[in-house]
Image (tube, rainbow, N blue to C red):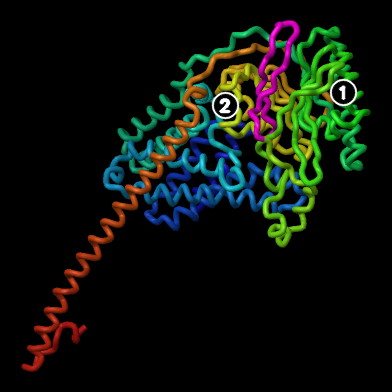
């Protein structure tokens, strides 16, 4: 239990804000050492303890957002239980005869199982929550270069492989088996640093885009909703005009505002529409901005293109609203547990279109498709991949981090944006209302970034790229293959366990039949004055 708890805590330090990426390997190694007992029930408990050690600090921002611990605790426990399922699955799988005495093959199987569990918790329940994937801890590590090869499934799998090899090093060194420990250590070093040999493409393939990004800040926290929304929109309009301190009107191709830059829809509110259009006219460029679209019973989270003098005719609607944050599933049921569900007054409904906004760029004389994944959607593999495959040449992650205070949520999100840049070979702009915002090269290098809770502007010339990485071409196949192999491994282990159990029962039955015969013979002899063996016991 102590090993598991320490392993979870160690793994959390591999993520921002500390970003000590080798700690992910140590954390996995400690978990595997803690799972040596051959009991699936015990392994579930141990895995869950590891998960609590990881997710409770990793998701602390959920407590900040809700204002009471129930949401943070419920989310952390649910995610930790997934690690418990991994522990039980690993015990079942390694019972298979072909795997039991092959530690080097076990290294691969345990990685497959881990990836399968990550895939499940990233899709279920309520659309999943793929936060805290091991892959996202490696944005400063050599393993990041594997992202364009196999995406998050491959990078997470290799993290587990390194952790499993490190567990062998620790276990064999303790037994003074120097040869095996040395071989495993060589494997740790080789697997960790070999990805440096993978080349990354960063050069423009379809020209460049001169962009400005505006972080307007939310200085009126706690104000009445309508006045705050007006102030936030005004902040971003002022920030757009502040770009003119660095560039002349017309020098920018596009200006980016964050999610919820104007929660009052400028398409239907004349005053806000005039403010947005005034800012766009002043800078001489179209503006991409986040807004809310309200219907009688639901609302939508839209990212719209506003063209100066023409308004908005193109938008993308968020496909993955956050359960319990942007909508409440089974509201009547959960209201019995906590009244906090009513903090979400109007449920957000999902959109259905691809996360792609076409922007006409006058300087290039063509339309540039831009991938626009909103906020938490940066964590979903398929959403961004589908958009890039549909033609996205630049990735924009508009987000609103105003609910998370000074927690590490925004830097965790920036790490995911860095991963997506390398995975798809695209420049990425993460633009937030309050920070952290950042501009990222296709090789994952942060070119510019901002602080928290401050107005800021960024300007950069970014490469437009059209080629697809191997990860893009493979699509969901790596994740699907890992899931199928995981099911087969667990099924093989269960089959071996059931077969051995039947054998034990058959042997016990034969022994019992022999004892019964001996008892009958003894009973016959008892008439001659002897005490039967069964009776003696």
Q: Which numbered disc covers residue 276?
A: 1
In front here: 17 or 418?
Answer: 418
Q: Which residues are magenta?
A: 352-375
Crowding around mark 1 (Cα neighbors within 10 Å: few <14, some 14 to 19, many 20+) is many
Q: Residue at x 12, y 88 (%)?
A: 523
Residue 43 x, y percent position in the rendering: 45, 53
Residue 384 at what x, y percent from top left? 60, 28
Quarter residue 367 falls in: top right
Q: Is residue 352 visible?
A: yes
Residue at 64% x, 12% y is 464
- Where disc 2 sits, the SS reads helix
Q: Is residue 4 magenta?
A: no
Residue placed at 61% from the left, 25% from the top? 387
The image position of residue 408, as x and y in percent, is 69, 36
Rounded to the nearest whole Å, what is the CA distance between mark 1 and mark 2?
31 Å
> Is residue 466 or residue 107 the one in the foreground?
466
Mark 2, residues whose alpha carbon is within 10 Å: few (<14), some, or many (≥20)? many
The residue that mark 2 highlights is 385
Q: Secondary structure at mark 1?
A: helix
């Amino acid at each position: 239990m102590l090993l598991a708890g320490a392993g979870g805590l160690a793994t959390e330090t591999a993520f921002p804000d500390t970003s000590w990426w080798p700690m992910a390997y140590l954390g996995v190694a400690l978990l595997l050492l803690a799972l040596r007992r051959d009991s699936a029930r015990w392994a579930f408990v141990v895995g869950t303890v590891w998960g609590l050690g990881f997710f409770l600090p990793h998701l602390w921002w959920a407590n900040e957002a809700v204002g009471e611990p129930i949401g943070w605790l419920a989310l952390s426990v649910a995610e930790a239980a997934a690690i418990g399922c991994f522990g039980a699955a690993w015990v079942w799988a390694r019972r298979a005869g072909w795997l039991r005495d092959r530690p080097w093959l076990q290294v691969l199987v345990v990685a497959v199982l881990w990836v399968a569990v990550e895939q499940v918790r990233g899709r279920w329940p309520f659309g999943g929550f793929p936060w805290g994937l091991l892959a996202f801890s490696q944005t400063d590590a050599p393993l990041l270069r594997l992202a364009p090869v196999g995406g998050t499934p491959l990078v997470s799998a290799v993290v587990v492989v390194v952790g499993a090899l490190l567990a062998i090093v620790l276990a064999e060194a303790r037994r003074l088996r120097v040869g095996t420990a040395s071989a495993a250590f060589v494997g740790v070093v080789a697997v960790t640093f070999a990805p440096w040999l993978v080349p990354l493409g960063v050069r423009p393939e379809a020209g460049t885009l001169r962009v400005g990004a505006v972080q307007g800040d939310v200085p009126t926290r706690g104000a009445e909703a309508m006045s705050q929304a007006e102030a936030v929109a005004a902040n971003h309009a002022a920030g757009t005009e502040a770009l003119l301190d660095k560039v002349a009107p017309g020098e920018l191709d596009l200006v980016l505002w964050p999610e919820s830059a104007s929660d009052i829809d400028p398409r239907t509110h004349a005053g806000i529409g005039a403010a947005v259009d005034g800012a766009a006219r002043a800078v001489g460029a179209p503006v991409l901005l986040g807004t809310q679209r309200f219907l009688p019973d639901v609302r939508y989270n839209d990212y719209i293109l506003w063209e100066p003098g023409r308004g908005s005719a193109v938008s993308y609607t968020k496909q993955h609203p956050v359960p319990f944050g942007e909508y409440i599933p089974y509201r009547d049921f959960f209201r019995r547990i906590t009244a906090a569900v009513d903090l979400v007054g109007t449920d957000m409904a999902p959109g259905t279109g691809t996360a792609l906004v076409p922007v006409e760029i006058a300087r290039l004389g063509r339309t540039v498709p831009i991938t626009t994944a909103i906020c938490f959607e940066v964590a979903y593999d398929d959403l961004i991949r589908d958009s890039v495959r549909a033609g996205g040449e630049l990735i924009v992650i508009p987000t609103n981090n105003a609910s998370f205070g000074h927690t590490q949520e925004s830097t965790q999100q920036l790490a995911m944006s860095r991963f997506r840049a390398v995975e798809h070979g695209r420049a990425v702009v993460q633009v937030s209302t309050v920070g952290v915002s950042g501009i990222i090269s296709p090789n994952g290098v942060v070119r510019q970034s901002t602080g928290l809770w401050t107005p800021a502007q960024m300007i950069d010339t970014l490469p437009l790229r059209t080629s697809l990485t191997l990860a893009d071409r493979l699509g969901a196949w790596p994740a699907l293959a890992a899931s199928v192999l995981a099911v087969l491994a667990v099924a093989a282990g269960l089959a071996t366990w059931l077969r051995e159990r039947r054998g034990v029962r058959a042997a016990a039955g034969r022994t019992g039949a022999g004892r019964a015969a001996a008892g009958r013979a003894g009973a016959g002899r008892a008439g001659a004055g002897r005490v039967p063996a069964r009776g003696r016991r």
